[in-house]
Amino acid sequence: MCQTTAFSQTQNDSLLKTVDSKTVVFITGAFVSNSGWDEWKTYFESKGYKTIAPAWPYKEGSAENLRSRHPDKDLASLSLKSVVDYHADLISKLPEKPILIGHSFGGLIVQLLLQRGIGAAGIAYHSVPPKGVITLKHSFIKSLWAPLGIFKSAKKPFLMSFKQWQYAFTNGMPLDQQKMYYDKLVIPESRVLMRGALKKTGKVDFKKPLAPLLFVSGSEDHIMPASLNKKTYKRYKKKGSKAAVIDYKEFKGTNHLAMSQPNWKDDADYIISWVNSH
């Protein structure tokens, strides 16, 4: 079951065209390895897409190896701007404008790239909101209080504990799966980068013309609640966005690690159908 809200605008006819790109760039979020996209890459390739899921700078290698290097001073210095620039440079070398699918912090990066005119379409999947969009929901504050570490130095990266992982990412999943995905995916993260979402680097112009943009959320997501994703979607609408299309989809029963839950193909199929419809 899911909840859908959608609207389209025709102010900018140049953006109202078919999304005919067959290249997908999967953009990873904070705290996790890019290997979380492995099944999605295989599935999208079976549907005729070419895919890449690049590791962020200083995050190449297995999650186990990256955890063994903690604390990594280079990783600690990683900023939101540098990660967005990194993806922009990588995408500029592709033969066509790709479809951008970003999870969590990757969803914010998708929005920031679309602001630059980069990408044929964007999917913000359980997305971090841009600067100025906030919620006081308890689960959001509880999940992010330790990672942001407002009163702590940003010179050392943050490594999420298993208990924090259980609450923020894998709530509702069996213990053995929570542990398996922790071992497979969890890596240290830059507090400089996370705090960047609260600053000018995380700001978007909601009135700027954009390629089609889809928000996908999950009803059981603690760290990025569905209500927060919908709030971001509504902010674009309220501000009179000139995006070709802005849509919103909420899936029931999915947490923040929706990309690895048993019904992840429902999400993937919806995204593929949405792309094809435009």
Image (tube, rainbow, N blue to C red):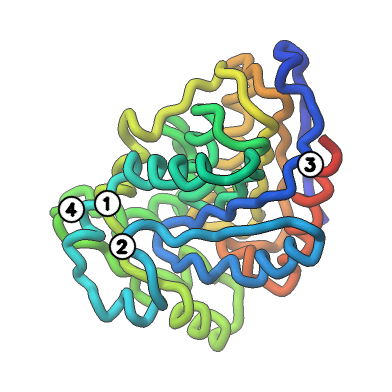
Q: Secondary structure at mark 3?
A: strand
Q: Secondary structure at mark 4?
A: loop
Residue 190 x, y percent position in the rendering: 28, 56
Mark 3 or mark 4: whose residue is earlier in sequence: 3
Work out how far the residue at label 2 is from the one at label 3, CA to CA, in angstroms.
Answer: 38 Å
Q: In the rendered image, which residue does mark 4 sit on?
A: 154
- Residue located 75% across and 18% down the image: 9
Work out how far the residue at label 3 is from the one at label 4, CA to CA, in angstroms.
Answer: 39 Å
Residue 103 falls left or right of residue 243: left
Mark 3 and mark 2 in contact (Cβ < 8 Å)?
no
For residue 4, the mark is 3
For residue 226, the mark is none
Q: Secondary structure at mark 2?
A: loop
Mark 1 or mark 4: whose residue is earlier in sequence: 1
Query: What is the three-letter code of the residue carrying label 2?
Result: Tyr
Q: Counting other residues with Cα less than 10 Å from the Cα at mark 3, is it few (<14), some (14-19), or many (20 or more)?
A: few
Q: In the rendered image, which residue does mark 1 sit on?
A: 78
Query: What is the three-letter code of the residue carrying label 4?
Result: Ala
